[in-house]
């Protein structure tokens, strides 16, 4: 299984978790219409703008993804790069409990 397939599986699990918990989210598909390096998922958690760039294995954020992270944080939003569903759930629950 390729890293792209594993990232897609992680993304599907994360979106399901958000929807199951009635958390608003957008799944950003990589296409010519989405800005290069856009986060995989954008959500509103506890009234906060939150972006997730999902990774698996040894994958790291690319430069264009790092630029989006910086811009989001400068705007007062939050940006995370979870590698597992458990890490994703912990981030979401921590944000919900803030």
Image (tube, rainbow, N blue to C red):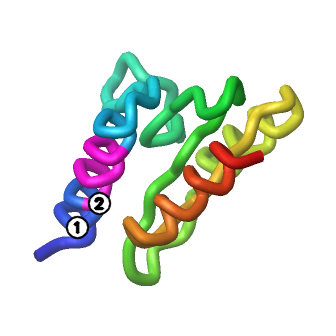
Q: Is residue 24 magenta?
A: no
Residue at numbered disc 2: 10
**Residue most extreme to the bottom:** 58
Expressed as whole percent of the image width and height from the top left, the position of residue 20 reads 29, 38
| Residue 38, percent from left and from top | 52, 35
Judged from this view, the residue extending furthest toward the top is 33
Which residue lies under the disc numbered 1?
6
* Tag 1 secondary structure: helix
What residue is shown at x 45% (from left), y 82% (from top)? 58
Quadrant including the N terminus: bottom left
- Picture disc at residue 52: none
Q: In front here: 68 or 78?
A: 78
**Tag 2 near tag 1, CB within 8 Å:** yes
* Above or below, comparing residue 40 to residue 46 in the picture: below
Q: Quadrant of residue 63?
A: bottom right
Q: In the figure, is residue 11 to the left or right of 25?
A: left
x and y percentages locating residue 87 in the rendered image: 51, 69
Seen at 85% across and 31% down, the residue is 76
Dominant SS type (magenta): helix
**Lateral position of residue 16 relative to residue 66, left or right:** left
Q: Which residues are magenta?
A: 10-17
Q: With 28 as the anchor, is 70 left or right in this view?
A: right
Disc 2 vs disc 1: which is toward the camera? 2
Of 90 and 10, the residue lying toward us:
90
Secondary structure of the residue carrying numbered label 2 = helix
The x and y percentages for residue 71 are 78, 34
Q: Is residue 77 above or below residue 57?
A: above
Q: Residue at x 32, y 34 (%)?
A: 19
Q: Residues within 10 Å of mark 2 (few under 14, many from 20)?
A: many
- With 14 as the anchor, is 45 left or right in this view? right
Q: Residue at x 52, y 40 (%)?
A: 39
Circle 1 crowding by C-alpha within 10 Å: few under 14, some 14–19, many from 20: some
């Amino acid at each position: 299984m390729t890293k792209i397939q594993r990232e897609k599986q992680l993304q599907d699990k994360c979106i399901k978790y958000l929807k199951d918990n009635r958390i608003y989210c957008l799944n950003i598909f990589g296409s010519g219409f989405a800005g290069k390096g856009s986060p995989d998922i954008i959500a509103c958690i506890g009234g906060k703008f939150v972006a997730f760039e999902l990774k698996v294995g040894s994958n790291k954020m690319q430069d264009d993804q790092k630029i989006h992270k910086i811009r989001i944080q400068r705007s007062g939003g939050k940006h995370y790069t979870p590698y597992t569903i458990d890490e994703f759930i912990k981030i979401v629950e921590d944000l919900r409990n803030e």
